[in-house]
Image (spheres, coloured by chain):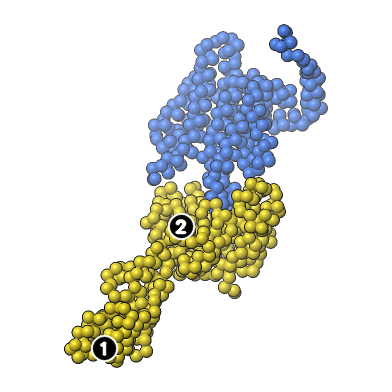
Chain colours: A blue, B yellow
Amino acid sequence: MDWLFNFPFEVNLNTDAIDQAVRGFAASYSSFFDGIKAALTNFVGAINWVFSYVPWFVLIGIVFFLSWKAHRRIRSGIFYSLLLCVIGAFGLWGLMNLTLSIVLAGVIIALVIGLPIGVLISGSEHANRIVRPILDMMQTMPVFVYLIPAVIFFGMGSASAVIATVIYSMVPVIRLTSLGIRQVNAEVVEAARSFGSTRAQLLFKVQVPQALPTIMTGINQTLMMAMSMVVTCSMIGARGLGNEVLIAVNRIEISRGFVAGSAVVILAIILDRLTQGWFSKKEEAGGEER
Amino acid sequence: MSDIIIETRNLSKLYGLRRDEAAEMLSKGAGKDSVLRKTGVTTALYDINLNIPRNEIFTIIGLSGSGKSTLVRCFNRLNRPSSGSILFDGVDLMKMSKPELREFRRHKAAMVFQSFGLMSHRNVLGNVAYGLEVCGVSREEREARAMEAISLVGLEGWEKATIESLSGGMRQRVGLARALANDPEVLLMDEPFSALDPLVRNDMQFELMDLQKKLNKTIIFITHDINEAFKLGDTVAIMRDGRLEQVDTPAAMSQHPANDYVRTFIDSADKTRVLSVCDIMLKPACLVRLTDSLTHAIREMRTNGVSSVYVRGQGMRLKGILTIDEAVRAHREGLAISDVIQADISTVPEDTLVSDVLPIAAEARVPIAVVDESGALKGIVTKAAVLSSML
C-alpha cells in the first residue's frame, strides 16, 4: 500500500547547476553589480554623513516639533522626544544613526520605484494582472531567501541590506497607492474628465490628492516593513542596532539583546507616529467641522 | 446660428461582442431583453434622433436603466456611442481628436452630477476654479471668474469653506457654479437634484429656471421625476429601454401622449402645473350683448339650460355676468341688462396655469372667464373642467 502514501516520482532539480549559473552571471556582470553596490553604499553613507553632523539635541528637537505638530498635542512632542533620549541614554545613538541610514535609503528607493508602479497598475488592468502575482510572491517569500542572491550579487554590507529592504518593503506602497487611486469616487473622476483634464492633470490634480490618505498609509506601512528588516539585514553585514541584537543572540547576552531590541522598537514607534499623525490630522479636521 | 444646438443622428450604444447581430435584431423591433438573451449584447441606446433647441431647458426623463444618463454622457463623449453621429453646431463630436475633444469639454459643455462629483481636497473656490485651472487660466483671473460663478449661485462668503462642511443643496450649488465658471454653451445636468430633499429641490429648480433666464444657456436636464421634467422643461423627451418614446412640449405631451407607455408615465404627473387655462377652456355656449333685451337673455339661458350668461360689450370685451335670478327680477321691474349685471367677476389671462386657478375655481359660483390682454373674452373655465384636468 506504499504507493498510496508515497508520492510516485521525484524530479531531481540540479540545484548545483542553478547556483553555478547564478554565480557565473554575477561574476560576468560584476562591474554592473559593483556599480550598483557602490552607488547604494554611497547613498547610505551620504545619509549617515548627514545624521552624523546633526547634533543630538537638534534631532530630538525635530522629533519634538514634528510630533507636536502632527498630533497637535505638546504632550506627544515631549513623550516621543523623551523616548528618543532613552536610546541615547542606552549608548546606542551612533548605532541608531547607522540603522536609520539603511532604513531611510531602503524606504526612499522603495518609494521611488513603488509609487509609479502603484499609479501604473491602478490605471491598467493589464499591468495589474502581471504585477499582482509578483507582489504576492514578494510578500510571502520567506525574508531570508532574499538575502542569498543579494549577497551573491552585491556582497556583504549595507548595499545588500538596502536591496533586501527595498524588495521586502516595496509591496505595501504599491498595493495601497493602486487601491487608493482605484477607490477615488468615479463621479469625481468623471467630473474632472468632463472639464477637459489631460491624463496628467487628472492624475496629479485629482486622483493622487484624493487618494493621499491611502497612499500615506502605504508609505507608513513601507517604513514599518523596512524597520522589521533591521535585524534580518544584520545577517548580511548591515551594521547598527540589528547587528547588536544579532551579537546578543549569538553570545546569549540577555540584557544586551533586550536593550538593543527596545531601541529598535522605540525607533519604529517614533517613525510610525511621526508619519501617521500627519495624515489622520486631515480626517480629524473634517470630522470637527461636520 | 441655427436654432438647433445639438443634433443626434441614429445614435446607438451597444455593449458586447455581437453588436452587428444585435443592431439587426433591434432594427426589426426586437426588445432589449430578447436581444440580450439571444446575442449577449446590452442595449444602452438605440437609434436616438434628437434636435435640441438652443437656449432652452431640454429635459430627458426615463426610469433607471432607460439610457438617459448614457445619452447625456454622449454629449460630451464621456461615453463613446457605438454608432451614429452627434452634431454640435454642425461639428461631429464623433470625429474629434483627443485634443479637440478636450477643448470642446473645456469651453462648450460643462456637466453637473447627481452626487456632485466634488473634490474633497479642495475648498469651494478650488472646486469652482478647477475647470479654468485645467485650461491654464492664470490664478488671479480664474479666482475672479470663480467668484463670479459662486455669487451667481448665491454662495458668497462660503468660498473658503470645505466641501464636508456644506449641506447637500449647497454642494450642488458648488457643482453648478463649477459648471458655470467655464461659461459653457451647454449645461449637462445628470439628475442634479435627485439627491436633495424635496424643499431644497424645489428651491433649486426655481433658481435654475431663474439662472437660465438670466444667462440664456442651453440646459440638458436629466431626471426621473416627471413633475420636475414638466416643470423645468421647455421640451421633454421620454426614454424607455434605450429608445426615445416621445419628444414634445409638456402641454402637448400631456394632451396627446404618443402611446400607452407615455400615458402611464405622465399619469403620475400633476398636470395642473403643465396645462394652462386655454388648454381646458370652453367656448361659451351663449353670450348676450349689453344692448340686448332681457327677454332675449332669458330665452338664451333657457334654451342652453344655464343659469347665468356672460355679457359682452363692443367687440368681445367682457362686461360682466347676468344670472337668471337677476334677469327675471330686472324684467319684472322693467330695468335693462346694464343695471343688473355683476361687473366684478373673476377673470384670468389665457396663459394662467391650471394649478393657479384651483383656488379661484373652488370658490367660484359661476364659470371663470378667460380674457386676453385687451380684456376680450376668449372662453370660460368651468369647475368641472378644472377638476377633471387633475385626473
Q: Using the rendered view, name the quadrant where residue B304 is placed.
A: bottom left
Residue type pointed to by label 2: Asp
Q: Is residue B350 above or below residue B188?
A: below
Q: Is residue B285 above or below residue B214?
A: below
Quarter holding the N terminus of chain B? bottom right
Query: Does residue B217 show up?
Result: no
The residue that appears at 52% across and 67% down in the rendered structure is B248
Residue A13 drawn at (x, y percent): 78, 18
Residue B185 drawn at (x, y percent): 55, 66
Quick one: A29 or B115, which is closer to the camera?
B115
**Label for residue B294?**
1
Quick one: B71 or B48, which is closer to the camera?
B48
**Chain bearing mark 1:** B
Could you give the CA–CA distance between mark 2 and mark 1, rounded to whole angstroms? 54 Å
Residue A163 drawn at (x, y percent): 67, 28
Do the residues marked 2 and 1 share a common chain?
yes
The residue that appears at 52% across and 26% down in the rendered structure is A268
Give left or right: position of A93 versus A40: left
Question: Are the residues at dot 2 and dot 1 in contact (C-beta closer than 8 Å)?
Answer: no
At numbered mark 2, what does the secondary structure look like: helix, strand or loop?
A: loop
The residue at which mark 2 appears reads as: B225
Residue type pointed to by label 1: Leu
Quarter holding the C terminus of chain B? bottom left
At numbered mark 1, what does the secondary structure look like: helix, strand or loop?
A: helix
Q: Is residue A109 above or below residue B85?
A: above
The residue that appears at 40% across and 51% down in the rendered structure is B167
Q: Can you name the residue that lies furthest to the front here?
A: B303
Q: Using the rendered view, name the quadrant where residue B194 is placed.
A: bottom left
The residue that appears at 73% across and 14% down in the rendered structure is A7
Query: Does residue B258 show up?
Result: yes
Quick one: A182 or B62, which is closer to the camera?
B62
Count of marks placed on residues: 2
